[in-house]
Image: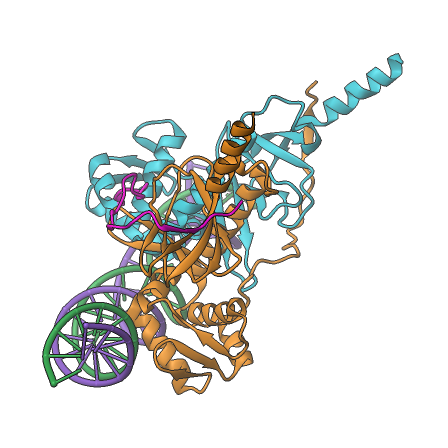
Chain colours: A orange, B cyan, C green, D purple
Amino acid sequence: MISVVARDDEVRRAARALVQFGKGQAVYHQGDAAHHWFEVVSGIVRTCRFMADGHRQLTGFFYAGDVFGVDSTSYPESAEAVTDAVLRRVSSAWLSEIPMPDAPRALEKALESARRSIFLFGHRTAANRVAAFLITTAERSGIQAGVKLPMTRGDIADHLNLTLHTVSRTISDFARKGLIALFGRQNVRILDLEGLRAIAGDAECELGGHYVMESEPGADIAGQP
Amino acid sequence: MISVVARDDEVRRAARALVQFGKGQAVYHQGDAAHHWFEVVSGIVRTCRFMADGHRQLTGFFYAGDVFGVDSTSYPESAEAVTDAVLRRVSSAWLSEIPMPDAPRALEKALESARRSIFLFGHRTAANRVAAFLITTAERSGIQAGVKLPMTRGDIADHLNLTLHTVSRTISDFARKGLIALFGRQNVRILDLEGLRAIAGDAECELGGHYVMESEPGADIAGQP
DNA sequence: CGTCTCCTTGAAAGCGTTCAATTACAGTGG
DNA sequence: CCACTGTAATTGAACGCTTTCAAGGAGACG
């Protein structure tokens, strides 16, 4: 009996461990069976999809405290360490024991996020996207005016659906216009947050209200017991 | 007792009725409380979001048998009849009582569709998008070579994230190259399906396999009971 | 101090949009 | 049945933004 409990404890321990990854190392690959989900303890992780045409699409950056890899069967995207990172790895089998948002809710959130990307890629210029990226990155990094960009320009480009050239040019433009200041390639100081916000525009650009187009509620033509 | 049952039956009837909408009429508006979901009996319905900048984004076209409006609290997008349409309107309260395998599946389909749009908007040219649209519309319409396009060019444009000019030009190009034939503005016959497919490219462009980048599984640095 | 990777910058080309005008079509009434 | 009318679609030309092509430069690390 005791040995069984001990073994159970061991399984529990193994099911929830701290693991570390070197810069650039893959946490898991697109298509892998989803045995674990992860929480970032330190460092930064990116999730990305590889397209058949060779293009890469970064779907998210994850900072300390963020969770990723919550997928039911197999991972729809790869996860890689942007910097050296320490992660808490939790076996998917323990999902039920740990309070997690229910599945349909998670689906809806994923859908919502996907729709935001559609908007971003559809109707925003390079300046819009980069400005929005700088602002949100600044907010997530915590430090107010000093933003660190540990990811490469290529990473940012694949996240915003631009080329690294355009990203670089746009950042340089912002610096030239006095919106930000650059210290080396990875350290940015935001000088004019309001100016950046004006360029970024309303990131959550959906209307809460209606575009009323006079319409009847639709006529009932048959009951249906 | 009997009266209660009768009243219950009445509620049931009201909760699931056939309703009809005229061409262009709104089924519901973006932001409305989601009291019902719908199944298309006949006709075509479009769902669309209106952005703060005035742009419109069509998120889907729905044909007979398709389900839309499956949202938990409020509709994130408007729904409008593209043609005169008859819909089966089901009260959200009956979601659990009515055997509805389509409901959760509708969400997954929407997410899949959204992801395809992200890819489409990100890495595909106008020709790619229009070709893909014609093919999928042909498949959904049922009739093999004769595609009907009851939606306007503007609708198609807002769905593919292009201008109506570009859509029109691209369709004309296809006709000029002999890939399709036009009969009036709404009837298209596909003459060279393989040619169209070649232009559309691989619409489901995610890799099933891995891009292996030699990596260790990540070293355990501490157990976590 | 060399080398590697990543970043920056310039110039030209590509593609879709915008502006502007014309044409086709459906619906309506004579 | 045909002219009239308004909406939708087509087409041309110029513009603008991003990409592509090409070259050079800045750090990081040994």
Give residue A108's position: percent from left, percent from top.
55, 44
The answer to whether residue B152 is above or below residue A5 is: below
Give the side of residue A218 with respect to residue B50, left or right: right
Displayed quadrant of residue A202: bottom right
The structure residue drawn at horizontal position 67% and vertical position 26%, both measured from the top left corner, is: B17
Residue B48 versus residue A121 in the image, above or below: above
Q: Which residues are magenta?
A: B200-225
Residue lying farthest front? A2
Q: Residue furthest top?
A: B2
Magenta residues, dominant SS class: loop
- Camera-nearest residue between A52 and B23: A52
Quarter where residue A211 is shown: bottom right
The percent position of residue B75, horizontal first and vertical second, equals: 62, 45
* Residue depicted at x 27% and y 43%: B210
Q: Quadrant of the C terminus of chain B?
A: top right
Residue at position x 54%, y 62% from top? B54
* Quarter where residue A162 is shown: bottom left
Which sits in the foreground, C28 or B33?
B33
- Please tell me which residue lies in front, A60 or D20: A60
Residue at the image point whose x is 32% and y is 77% from the top: A169
Task: Please state, as top left, top right, bottom left or bottom right, where the N terminus of chain B lies in the image.
Answer: top right
Q: Is residue B142 rendered magenta in the image?
A: no
Give the percent coordinates (x, y) of residue A210.
65, 54
Using residue A170 as the reference point, say whether residue B50 is left or right of it. right
